[in-house]
Image: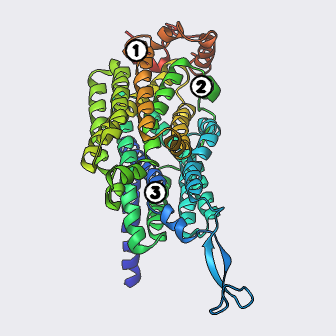
Amino acid sequence: MAKAALGKFAGAIGERCQRISGAMNEPLRKRQILLVIVCIAMLLDNMLYMVIVPIIPNYLETIRTYKLVYITTPSNGTNGSLLNSTQTAVLERNPNANEDIQIGVLFASKAILQLLSNPLTGTFIDRVGYDIPLLIGLAIMFFSTITFAFGESYAMLFAARSLQGLGSAFADTSGIAMIADKYTEESERSRALGIALAFISFGSLVAPPFGGVLYEFAGKWVPFLVLSFVCLLDGILLLMVVTPIASRTRENMPQGTPIYKLMIDPYIAVVAGALTTCNIPLAFLEPTISNWMKKTMNASEWQMGLTWLPAFFPHVLGVYVTVKLAAKYPSYQWLYGAVGLVIIGASSCTVPACRNFEELIIPLCALCFGIALVDTALLPTLAFLVDIRYVSVYGSVYAIADISYSVAYALGPIVAGQIVHDLGFVQLNLGMGLVNILYAPALLFLRKVCQMKPSLSERNILLEEGPKGLYDTIIMEERKTAKDPQGSWPGNHSVLPDQEGYSE
């Protein structure tokens, strides 16, 4: 009887699992779950990126390099004679251990390796799809987080930080590209990418207080173990939704455009430049603003730790406003990005004028609001450019976007401190603000792209302005994928079969 009951229970569990599996594999539900998986991956990556901000300086203080020094002191009554002197052994900090340089290199190592890896990962994603690279990225991030948790030397922390850069090159690029691939309608794509950006912002801004509190009360390993556990769960969820290896059939996947061709595309280059420019103030302020606050406004530790936390709310507001505007007025994406650059520039110039913590919150909130405008407007534009000018495979184009971010965050920890030392904090902010304001008119170049409506023959309009030979390349791709049985085009050559619903 017990055996029958156990069998009945096992059957019920199996039936329930089948129902869950069937529900998860419904197209709409599967797309939503994949969005959740990508958002969690973005959250983890940015939390791991920022969680070390309050931890590493204090931790390096505990593992500083010391050397044994003998101090000679004359014995009493010898009038300073060294004949009866005594030697005392003391530990003295090794002057060769420069913590400022160590911290700067450690913070920048992730972005540097991510920058170097992105051209290769982008090509890899275009060849194998999005799910395998995302799984690889999550696995690498898991091992990176475990290494952070149990690393006891600067070399181990450096290896963990660099390993995270490699994982980010896989996970970030494939995740954003997967969203662009699953959400093909422009308004849905903007909304999905906006949700991912909100998770990125939340991870970046909540990580410092999260890491600082757990580090102080539970130890260095606790925040990293929490992140590694969430990373493991995210990878398991991905394996439940997709089967990256068993069901992989690559024969029918279109060949993506090489990344070097995308890099020299003038429209993509303008977008990439805007993404780099808008993130420079954030990347340069993060390693320098705490010392400036301490010197100019005598800020307390909790104020320095919570500097960026209020900016999360205007960042989410910026994402929401841009998504709503893009849905209603899709032809003005370039304008939203330009307005964001101007807001960033003005906010950056205002930061040095602040004299207390309360005043500083205002320009930092405006800065993150402007970054949200630029990112939310221009990330979908990259996918749109690929759709109308090349083959709709997004790994390489979002590798370029990741490169744009990595350039800013690789330079920030290394260059920003030197600029402040040589020129001053005020000059650093004025320079960053001026660069953003001057770059804003460059987005006018995207006006014709953003004004095209889906009902037009978009590809032909841009082909007239595109580089020579691009039309022949695309026509060859179309003939490979959309021939009729006789090997000739059915109807109008200017409209792809999958764009028939867009023709007039």
Q: Residue furthest bottom?
A: 77
Q: Secondary structure at mark 1?
A: helix
Q: Nearer the viewer, residue 383 or 275?
A: 275
In the drawing, does residue 166 fall left or right of residue 267? right
Name the residue nearer the viewer: 440 or 470.
440
- The mark lying in front, picked from 1 and 3, is 3
Q: Which residue is mark 2?
A: 263
**Which badge, 1 or 2, is on the more N-terminal residue?**
2
Please state which amino acid type lies under the numbered disc 2: Met
Structural distance between the alpha carbons of marks 1 and 3: 40 Å
**Which quadrant of the figure contains the N terminus?**
bottom left
Above/below status of 206 relative to 225: above
- Give the spatial CA distance, label 1 vs label 2: 19 Å
Q: Is residue 130 visible?
A: no
Mark number displayed over residue 53: 3
Write down the residue under mark 1: 447
The mark that comes first in sequence, 1 or 3, is 3
Say which of marks 3 and 2 sits in front: 3
Q: How many marks?
A: 3
State the image quarter where residue 482 is shown. top right
Residue 115: percent from the left, percent from the top?
60, 40
Q: How many residues crowd mark 2 within 10 Å: few (<14), some (14–19), many (20+)? A: some
Q: Earlier in the sequence, mark 3 or mark 2?
A: 3
Callout 1 amino acid: Arg
- Where is residue 255? Give x, y as percent: 62, 28
* Residue lying at 56% horizontally and 45% vertically, measured from the top left: 414
Helix, strand or loop at disc 2?
Answer: helix
Amino acid marked by disc 3: Val
Contact between marks 1 and 3 (CB within 8 A): the answer is: no
Neighbor class of circle 3 (other Cα within 10 Å; few <14, some 14-19, many 20+) is many
When the figure is inspected, residue 140 is found, relative to residue 200, above or below; the finding is below
Residue 168, x across and y down, in percent: 54, 48
